[in-house]
Amino acid sequence: MVDYPINNSGTATGAAGSDKVIYNITVAGGVTLTGMTGSLATGYSGTFNGPGGNDGTFSGIEHFTFTDNAGSADSITTGDGNDSLVGGGGNDTLNGAAGSDSLYGGNGDDLLTIVVDGTDVIDGGANNDTLNVVGGSTGFTLTTSAISGAGTATIAGIEQFNVTGSSAADTITTGTGNDTINAGGGDDTIDAGSGADSVNAGAGNDRIIINLGGTDTIDGGADTDTVVVVGAGAALTVTTTSISSAAGTANLTNVERFDVTGSSVADNITTGGSSDSVSGGAGNDTINAGEGWNNVYGGAGDDQITAGTGSDNIYGGDDNDTINAGNGNNYVEGGNGNDNVTTGNGSDTVLSGAGSDSINTGDGDDYITLEVGGTDSVNGGNGNDRLNVNIGGATAITLTLTNITRGADTVTLSGIDRFNITGSTAADNMTTGSGDDTVDGGQGNDTLNTGAGADYITAGSGDDVVVAGDGNDTIYGGTGADNIDAGIGNDYVEVYGTFDTVIGGAGIDTLQADWSADITSRVLDANANGLEVLDVTLGSGNDSLVSAQSHIADDYLDAGSGNDTVQVFLGGNDVVVGGNGTDVIEVINNRVGTSVNLTNLSGAGTYSGTFLSSGHSVSFSGIEIIRFVDNVDGDDVIEGANTVNAGGGNDMVDGTIGNDLLDGGAGNDSINGLAGDDTINGAAGADTLRGGLGNDSITGGSGNDKIYGDDGDDALFASNLDYAYGGNGNDVLTGGDDREFLYGGAGNDVFYGGLDRDYIYGDAGVDYWYGDAGKYLDIVVSIDLNTTSVYQGSQGRIRFIEGMNFSASNKSDWITLHNTSALNDVLVMRNGNDRVEMIMGGQDEFFGGAGTDILEVTGRDLVAATTMTGSTLVSGLDTINFDSFERLFYTAVGTGNDLLLGLSGADVIKSGDGNDTVTGAAGGDNLNTGGGNDSVNGGDGNDTITGGDGDDIILGAAGQDRIMAGAGNDTITGGGAADVMTGGSGADLFIFSSAIQQGGDRITDFQDGVDTIQISGVVFADLDIRQRTNGDLEIKISRGTFLVLDDTAKASITAADFDFI
């Protein structure tokens, strides 16, 4: 941009591009800009006509800066560029036109003009200045200090405004001057402030805020316009053509709606036919709201409120109001005070407050809420009118169709068709009519008579009497012992008390009982009281509920929380819900000639399912224990019940995963206990009984039964030529007085033959046999000595065992002899890898036979030493001679000095305390010497040697051994392979031969300065000692790794740690 300064007079000719004239006048007399031609695109031409021939002529100029330093009255109108005009003193007229302009009026009464499109700065300066604001097509917001929207401006020093709005929605707020506003199109919001203002809102739904402070002229223009006025201390008078108070007057034209807030004194407000909002404020106001849908707030004071035919919301406020709502569906709140409320035609809602009120609702279905207090009257007029009353308090009421009395309070009633009433905490007496009433007795022993109609009745707490009359009623008894007569109709009755009396009357009635207290054996005789459907919910106690046998409707019984028992008879289609706790359902069939099936059983521990029988059902859920009793003959199928008495017929019964009690009754039954510890009784008939999972007790009963224990530790009781099979588990099989077949199956079983000749088959497991004390010859069909222990019993109790003299099978037998007496036992093992376990006692002989046999012996003498020479073990008075055993497992218990030799296999020897000598011989042995100064030789094989306390001498010998010497000053020789040695506490000596030990032995806990390493054939200088990266120390000689010391620093090892021989 090129600047062309002109001081007082001169000529400026702009070139191509953007040019600016800077015109400064210092001569008094004023300047007028004339002859402006051109445009912002081509540049402007004209003349600043100054006093005394001081003119500034220009051409090709886009922007202007004008400054009057003499302070005269100037008239400057520039183009659309970005101009700066400073008027100085005098009454100046400055018009920046479009663009971003800065206008400074200075002293004098100035007139400044801007177009809202740029970023302008306006400062009127001193005196009384006027700002002309010209809008365009985009809406803007004007305040006394700024403009925003289509353009922006900062404003200062302006006393009054002349505003031409845009064609869009503007927000115009002026100050205390006498302003002229032509808002133009759009939905405008106009606040002209105080002063004598002239407002033309133009087209659009405008909102005009009036601040009385002069004589205003308001023209709303086209469309629906609203005037807003807020009164102050002076009384306000509002009509459709004017608003006035002591502060001023506003004359109105083309105003459709009013938003009026009255003063704190008596106002007189009349609005038109649109939807108006009027708040009278304090004072005794007179309000005529017109015909629209109005919101009227009387406020404090004795107000007179009249509305037209619209559906109005009227709030009288406190004090004594007179309200005439007119026709329409009105909402009226009288407020506190002695109010007189009248409504016309229409469905009105009327709410009274405290005080003696008179309510007349006229025609229509009206809803009246009354606050009882004083002397009230309610006339519902024509239509179906409802009275809503919430009495409360401790004073009883009496309600009739024509009166309400509560102590000294009275209500006169007429034209009321329906009641919605809540009583007091005392004993109320309420009688309603034939409408559909809602009655809540509240606390106290109430008497409620509702008459005809579909009534909703809540008796509340107390011992209440309810007579519902005709109609389909809903009745809630509440707490207390209630006496309820539901009357004619299809009624729903719900009771909570423990001692309620319910009469259903004619019609299909439903009872739902919700008892929170514990109930013991309560019987519901529904038919006797005219109740067709039961809907019962029990509480949190441990309840017992029994439905009547004769009831055949479709019932819903919810046991609630607690350990509950529900008994139902098959008849109808019933639903039983167990809820929390351990719940029991007992289903009883008394219907002759029918069979019952239990279907769709699901769950684990908590069950759901359905009993079905000839079109009738009982469906249940949340049940832990299922019981079924069939009191008639019939072939039932019961799967999943906990307790079943199947009765006569050939029944099929399955238990649950819980602990079931199943009784087949007469007939050839099939019973399966499934999971759980079940008790099963076949009773009469040839039954098939299975225990399933769990530890079951099964009794065959009379008849030739087949009994299967299945899994678990079962007790089977056979009789009458029964077949009993224990299955898996440690079972007890007991025969009766006849010939039974007892088959143990897997597990450690016990057999009691009983009288007569029984057949016993032990099968796998540690089995025990008890006969019948020799009265009959029991036959053991098979004794499999795999995993079998033989116990000696008292004389005459164990058949076929006169001594411990057995010849084992050709299988891999495992025999445990628990006899610790001094009997002389002989065991001859055969083929297979056999194992004999015993505690030493007596003079025993064991012969291993073919295979890899193990002899496992535990000593019993706590003092004597154990000595083993060849194939003989001697401990005190006990001796074992053995042959053909490959492995020895020996555990000493005494403190003697034992001499023990391993066998050819992998032995396990624990010598106990004492100075013992143990030799492992061949095989990978596990040798543990315990306390004492022991001598141990691992022998061949990869041995594990544990020395225990004492100064032990340990030789690993051949094999890769693991030696743990324990406490004491031990001497340890690993042997020829890669051994791992742990010296333990004490000063230990580790012995190596450099000539033979090149396998990389390891010492895990070498103690520098405490332990010693003895090496033959080398000196310290022959050792190559290296530190490994993991912290271990590696010692080498010429042939390779000799020894590794775990977690040992090289610097800590010196010749003093070695003994070279």
Image (cartoon, grey):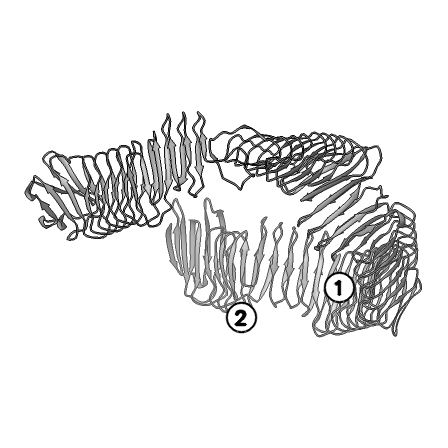
Count all numbered tags in the image, as a single digit. 2
Crowd rating for badge 1 (residues with CA inside 10 Å; few <14, some 14–19, many 20+): many
Question: Which label sits on residue 278?
Answer: 1
Query: In the picture, which quadrant includes the C terminus?
Result: top left
Question: In the image, residue 124 lies at what x, y percent?
Answer: 51, 65
- In this rendering, position of residue 928 left or right of residue 203: left
The reply to whether discs 1 and 2 touch (Cβ–Cβ < 8 Å) is: no
Residue 1028 seen in the current view: no
Question: In the image, residue 816 lies at what x, y percent?
Answer: 44, 37
Q: Quadrant of residue 276?
A: bottom right
Query: Which secondary structure lies at badge 1?
Result: strand
Query: Which secondary structure lies at badge 2?
Result: loop
* Up/down of 349 relative to 527, above or below: below
Question: In the image, residue 524 lies at what x, y percent?
Answer: 83, 50
- In this rendering, position of residue 939 left or right of residue 88: left
| Mark 1 to mark 2 CA distance (whole Å) | 40 Å
Residue 858 seen in the current view: yes
Amino acid, disc 2? Asn
Sequence order check: which comes first, mark 1 or mark 2?
Answer: 2
- In this rendering, position of residue 487 left or right of residue 546: right
Question: Which label sits on residue 127?
Answer: 2
| Foreground of the two, 1007 or 510 | 1007
